[in-house]
Image (cartoon, rainbow, N blue to C red):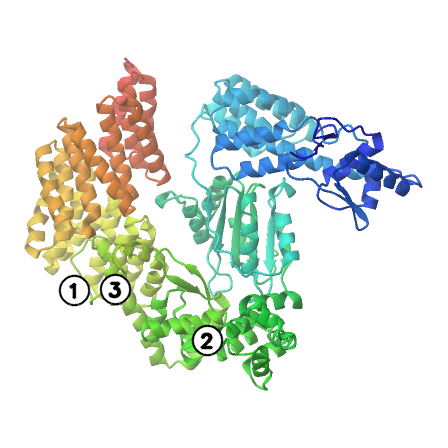
Amino acid sequence: MADAIFGVLGPVRARHATGRHIRLSGRQRAVLATVLLNVNTTVSRDRLIAAVWDDPPPSAVANLQTYVAQLRRALQPEARLHTSGAGYLFEAAPDELDLLLFEDEVRRARVESDPASAARRLEHALALWRGRPAEDASLGNAMTPRLTELEERLADVRADWADLRLQLGMHDEVIGALRVFVAEQPLRERAWQQLMLALARSGRRAEALETYRQARETLVTELGIEPGPELRLLQAAVLSGTPSANRPEQRGAICQLPADIADFVGRSEELTAITTLLRPEITPTALPIVTVTGPPGVGKSTLAVHAAHLLREDFPDGQLYLRLSGASPAPQEPGALLAELLRALRVEGDSIPDTVAERAALYRSLLADKAVLVVLDDAADGLQVAPLLPGTPRCAVLVTSRGPLIALPGAVAVSLGVPPEREARELLESVAGGSRVRDEPDAARAILHACGRLPLAVRIAGARLAARPAWSLRDLAARLAVTGAPLDELALGGQNVRAHFVASYEVLSAPARRAFRLLGLAGLESAADWSVAALMGVPRREAESAVETLALAGLVTANEVDESGQPRYRMHDLLRAFARERAEAEESPAGRAAALLGFVEECLARLRAAALEYPPPMRPPMDSVPPPVESARVDGGWQRAWLHAERKTLADAVALAEPVTAAELAQRLAPFLVAHGFFAEAIGLLENVAERTGDTHTTMLIRLVRADILTDRRRTALAEPELRLLIDYFEGAGDRHAVAYALATLAICELISGRHESALTLVTRSLPLFEAYGDTNGLISALVTTSGIHLDRSEYDLAIATCRRGLELAADPRFADFAIRFRRVLGIAHFELGEVETAIGHYEASIEASRELGWGTGERMALRRLGQAYSELGRYELAATTLDRCAAMFAQAGDGHGQGMTFYARGEVSLKQGRPDEALHYFRLCLDQVEEPIWRARAAEMVERLRHDPA
């Protein structure tokens, strides 16, 4: 325990550890209040005088010195109030001053993952306030901004506390505090909104609407403005009776920031500017935006990532990171960038809107009133960035760009030039070794001068020294000083970025230069060692050595490891463009074609191996036979992680490949993309290669795979006519194998549409064809469909027999998703036969396998069935909880049909619990979601029955 406790959040307080209060005169109290309000910060003498007197007397300096001396004596034996330059510094530990305790509790609350714990911390923080800041101290007008800032801070924390209480469902308990708050701060719309929400969720709808009327009257009278859109929307929600709906499931905060680098040095002024401008409490009414601009190689991205890591605690709701590729010939479009952001915010599949405006609106809604930092790296211009901006001021945006972003109103620019010599030297020391650089100061100065202090060039020089321990700094400085040497151009060119790239390129070894050129030729956003080896046509060890040289030279970054554990190398967009120029100038046309062919063939070989974990595409097996797979390629259970890591690379390979190879790549990649929710990407790749191929039969096979994906997404209106056309074509072409696949897929469409007889006829026609061709994949798929038909026809014994046959065939890990389906159908069949415990075992096995495979659709479908089984056993609360969680998962995935069917099951549980009104609510929700005729009819029947006979 400290000897004295101080307080400034209310009347100024100072006491000894014994509890005895220190008596203060009026001016002493003002001096103490000023230094406490600026604790652990030097306050200049002039500022102290302005704080104590609005009109200082001639003796102000002497009087101030007297008050300081008196305070020091009163505080003895502690020495807290120190002379610091031309001012004074008051030192206090975090637990010795209520202001510091308040800030510490708020900071801790922000990083709490549990809302209840965060609310308790904010309650502790708010309890420290005993009145207005330093309310009994006679302070000059110079202190008004600081006092106002603290009162604004208190208001924000009170609002955050109220949000947490509302989130925890404590609506009644928070109403009283909110009434006090709106009385004290009647112009804060957020407080009115919270009070309205609390009243509405407490069933006090009339009071909520009266609160809106009062808020509007206050705003119109005092400010001459109408309430903002959020308050108006809440009024509409209260009128429609919807504000009491549960909030979405809370998830952990997202952090997409790349790893910070360990040897970051300098840039202290720029870091201070960025972090100060972006902290949420500094600009409470406007979105903080900072742009970092400067030439390539100056360290914009590194600085932005480092600053973002420093700000993580200030943005507890997450940190988003996006590369905009502004320096490339084709900067990313805002629509694609918004789709990437929405996926990062867990918006899946078809729930992403089509237009840029709709995507931007959804993105802003998801970030509304959240503390999220958005880092946009390498922007092309303000028009590219504008749609990516959040809409509320608790967020903040940090943008890097080569030039100023004049189309971003309100943005504060931080211009980044070359660092001062001291910081450049520190960077050289961090890479090459501190003692080594300090031992040769003149040579170090010569190297920095030759590099123009550009961080990229300095890092290259340091990396070369680190790679050659036998060199002295004088040796490197001498090499740079030779007339005509590449690095001479760096010194002569100054800020000429191309000169930096040319110089760095020409000092590399021949293999490294070729690796650099070919990476640019392929245009890969990032590359693993195997990609470089394939482009170069050399053993992997040689490629690794070449890429390591590029990394030491600073021409690629090597601080990233992907999901499969591979080191990944990224090249700046401008460097990639320069590398492509060098490839076109130095590689022959035949050499360029051979490099790309080698890369594409390696992609195909690796994809063939990696795709073995997934079912083949739904078409006859491809003729190409996979080559032997080396253990160094895709190993065991890493296929899925490798495919995730190389998804973009494989898509690039499709674009680079000639039509036949591109078609095979796209079709083999499609099952992985579908399994993990990248439906639009799979469809896009298939449609692209279908347009490129000149062979009609190949095009029709690609369309067959596309039709299967459409069917999987229940888009039968598109798939069904396509499949009938394909059946006619393949029968005319004599391809009975392809006919089997088209029949089996069309059978699924018929099953979805409730036409069971037609579905059974179609799938029955396909089964002997698959058996005749020895096609296990097609046969298993057809058996899954057959089992579903038997279920719908109440032929449960046949369904069980079909599933058991299917499970025997699906033992291969490639058919894991089919095995999951069979387990679920087995569960349904046993459930319908009254063997509920057996059914639960199958459902649980299906759920576990789905999670292992990362197949969300399979997990959700089995989870719904599990909830129904719990209900059948009379475990209604567990059933309701399970189904509520399942409905939320369907909603998150954008699957309205699955959500609607889950609502139907939830309504059945409510009926069994004797809650007809609740059941009616869920059946209506089902009717709003489902489109299939059979389920619409069932839901409509239940709604009609409960409306006329609730009992």
Q: Say which amino acid is labelled 2.
A: Glu
Q: Amino acid at mark 1?
A: Asp
Dot 3 amino acid type: Ser
Label 3–label 1 contact, CB within 8 A: no
Using the rendered image of the protein, determine whether residue 92 is visible from the camera's viewpoint. yes
Gap in Å between the C-alphas at discs 3 and 2?
36 Å
At x 32% / y 21%, what residue is drawn?
A: 920
The label nearer to you, 3 versus 2, is 3
Count of residue discs: 3
Q: Position of residue 285 (x, y in %)?
A: 63, 40
Task: Tell me which numbered mark, 3 or 1, is placed earlier along the sequence.
Answer: 1
For mark 1, does the 10 Å Cα neighbourhood hold few (<14), some (14 to 19), or many (20 or more) residues?
A: few
Residue 420 falls left or right of residue 49: left
Q: Nearer the viewer, residue 675 or 1?
A: 1
Where residue 190 sits: x, y (%)? 58, 31
Label 3 Cα neighbours within 10 Å, binned few <14 / some 14-19 / many ≥20: few
Q: Residue furthest right?
A: 58
Which of pointers 3 and 2 lies earlier in the amino acid sequence?
A: 2
Q: Look at the picture and state if 254 lies above or below 139.
A: below
Query: Tag on residue 581?
Result: 2
Q: In the rendered image, which quarter contains the N terminus?
A: top right
Residue 2 % position (x, y): 67, 35
Indicate which label's residue lies in the foreground, 3 or 1. Answer: 3
* 717 sits to left or right of 527: left
Give me the disc on residue 631.
3
Is 757 rendered above or below residue 818?
Answer: above
